[in-house]
Image (cartoon, grey):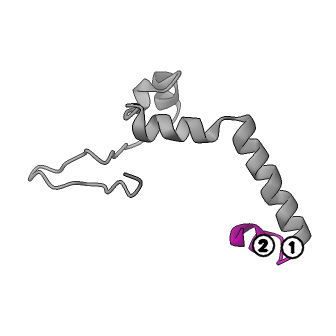
């Protein structure tokens, strides 16, 4: 909520309307289900996403998962959600 208040110069009514719209968008687009599929459903690679190969070709990037290790076996990333 603080992010929305800052974005609306601490106007509580506008910030709460924006927050409600954000929550509705999350529900309408199943954002929480998508997040849970990524965290707990085994979608641990961009290639497992719908159209993942096309997306990676359009926007190549380095993807670091919580299971990624360096040459000495140390974790590269930390998954704070698990």
* Visible residue check, residue 60: no
Q: Earlier in the sequence, mark 1 or mark 2?
A: 2
Q: Nearer the viewer, residue 78 or 72?
A: 78
Question: Who is closer to the viewer here, 70 or 80?
Answer: 80
Q: Are the residues at dot 1 and dot 2 in contact (C-beta closer than 8 Å)?
A: yes
> What's the mark number on residue 49?
none
Task: Check the image and report above or below for 2 versus 62.
Answer: below
Vertical comparison of 58 with 31: above or below: above
Q: Which residue is the site of mark 2? A: 5
> Which residue is painted at 89% across and 66% down in the image?
14
SS for callout 1: helix
Query: For residue 12, which numbered disc appears in the image?
Result: 1
Task: Answer with the quarter of the image where residue 44 lies.
Answer: top left
Circle 2: element type: helix
Where does the N terminus fall, quadrant-wise?
bottom right
Mark 2: few/some/many CA within 10 Å (<14, 14-19, 20+): some
**Which stretch did the figure color magenta?**
1-11
Left/right placement of residue 69 relative to residue 21 reads left
Residue 77 within the magenta-colored segment of the rendering = no
């Amino acid at each position: 909520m603080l992010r929305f208040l800052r974005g609306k110069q601490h106007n509580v009514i506008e910030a709460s309307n924006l927050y409600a719209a954000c929550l509705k968008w999350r529900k309408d687009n199943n954002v929480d289900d998508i997040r849970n599929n990524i965290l707990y459903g085994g979608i641990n690679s961009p290639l497992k996403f719908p159209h993942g190969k096309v997306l990676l070709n359009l926007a190549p990037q380095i993807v670091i998962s919580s299971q990624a290790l360096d040459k000495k076996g140390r974790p590269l990333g930390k998954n704070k959600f698990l």
